[in-house]
Image (tube, grey):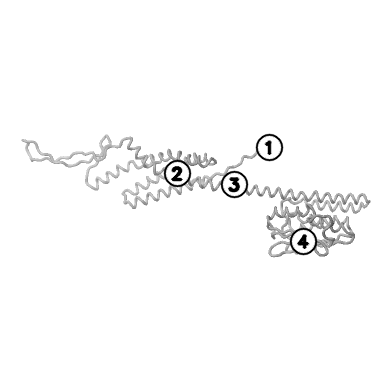
Amino acid sequence: MIISKTPETRPTVPFRMVLLSMIVMWSTYFVLITMRSFVMDYELQIEMAWRRGIVTMVGIALTIALWGMLRLFDHKAVWLKVMAAIILSVPVAIAIGKTNHLVFQDMQEVEERKYAEKNGINLRRDEAGNLLVDVPVTRVAPDGANGADTILDSESVILVPAQTSADVWKAVFDIALGRYFLLLAWASLYFAILAGYQARAAERRGQEFRSAAEAAELRSLRYQVNPHFLFNTLNSLSALVMTGKAERAERMIQTMSRFYRHSLADEPTSDVQLRDEFDLQQLYLDIEAVRFPERLVCNFDLPDDLADARVPGMILQPLVENSVKYAVSAVNRPVTITVKAREEFDRLVVTVSDDGPGVPENASHGFGIGLANVRDRLEARFGSDIVLSSSPIEGGYKTELRIPLTKNG
């Protein structure tokens, strides 16, 4: 069976955010240019405003085209992004400059007519496109002519020569230069927004990896408990069968069945209510009571207001098992195992204690995998915000864990 790998989704800037940045930039351009025209007291404000609006709309459309090219470099090196912005902004700026020139081209003729009317002069353009002005002149009559000695006439003078193709492109490039730096500013803004999205995506991936690692660690530690306990209970069951205690063996099998049905019902990495954890340990001690009917005494103390506190599943089982192994089975007298919960300064305190012989001879402090498993699981779940203490006390042994108090979580 071939399992295909789901391709990783690379972070990108949503089109809505891209479009919003373009609209904000070009709207700012429109407002600033319009304010400048009012400050400079230009005429024909309405005619220039709607033409400026057309240029703004075309600028937004061409900036979208620029974004379509720049997004190909979203996941490239920074220097490639910079070079792409510098190079690709050139043709877009020229296109905007050419659009601006075409849209405002007829405004020059309108301004010329307004100026001529205001000053009472005659401005016109010849076929070549030269701007002419008619200037009155006085001519002296030739000798022998009848009439006045002078003749009033007019003469056309070239005020502004016709624009050549080079002049047109020079004007276009002059406009494009300003728009070029505007586009570079927007490209910088776009790549900054992209970097923010990529950083947040990397942070989410890191959190997912950390959560997956913690879940795997919790699952691994949880599964260490079940085989350990199963090994001990099967040994006990085997001893009962071999000694002919069939009724007690049957009762132990039934209790084991209830225990495993209860313990395996929960997700290994999830927390459980403290009442469920206490019930589970009660089942476990019921199993052990079949082995030690005269020696094992249980005492559970769970306040009602802590019943729904959350703890890692089966977190108490290694501690209770240690008490059975090193206290109950080590002596020939009744031993009481006490499991108790209380609250101290918004922290949950759970103790497992017994009145057995204390630390067994030739046993290292910690009793092997039991306490190490509990400590590792608590640290994986709560970090360093836990306290686990285990030591002999007068007349027995006590293990105490302190963890953050959480409910219904």
Which corner quadrant of the image does residue 332 belong to?
bottom right
Q: For this view, does 206 lie left or right of residue 310?
A: left
Of circles 3 and 1, which is in front?
A: 3
Sequence-wise, the earlier of marks 3 and 1 is 1
On residue 17, the disc is none
Question: What amino acid is labelled 2 in the image?
Answer: Leu
**Label 4 crowd (10 A; few <14 / some 14-19 / many >=20):** many
Near mark 3 (Cα within 10 A), the count class, few <14, some 14-19 or many ≥20, is: some
Question: What mark, if any, has residue 3 been given in the picture?
Answer: 1
Residue 155 appears left or right of 281? left
Name the residue beneath numbered marker 3.
202
Which image quadrant: the C terminus?
bottom right
Q: Earlier in the sequence, mark 1 or mark 2?
A: 1
In this view of the protein, which residue sits in the foreground, 325 or 37?
325
Determine the CA span between mark 2 and mark 4: 66 Å
Identify the secondary structure beneath mark 4. strand
Residue 125 screen position, x and y as percent:
26, 38
* Crowdedness near tag 2: few (<14), some (14–19) or many (≥20) residues, C-alpha within 10 Å: some
Q: Residue furthest right?
A: 244
Which element is circle 3 on? helix
List x then y, in percent, for residue 224: 77, 49
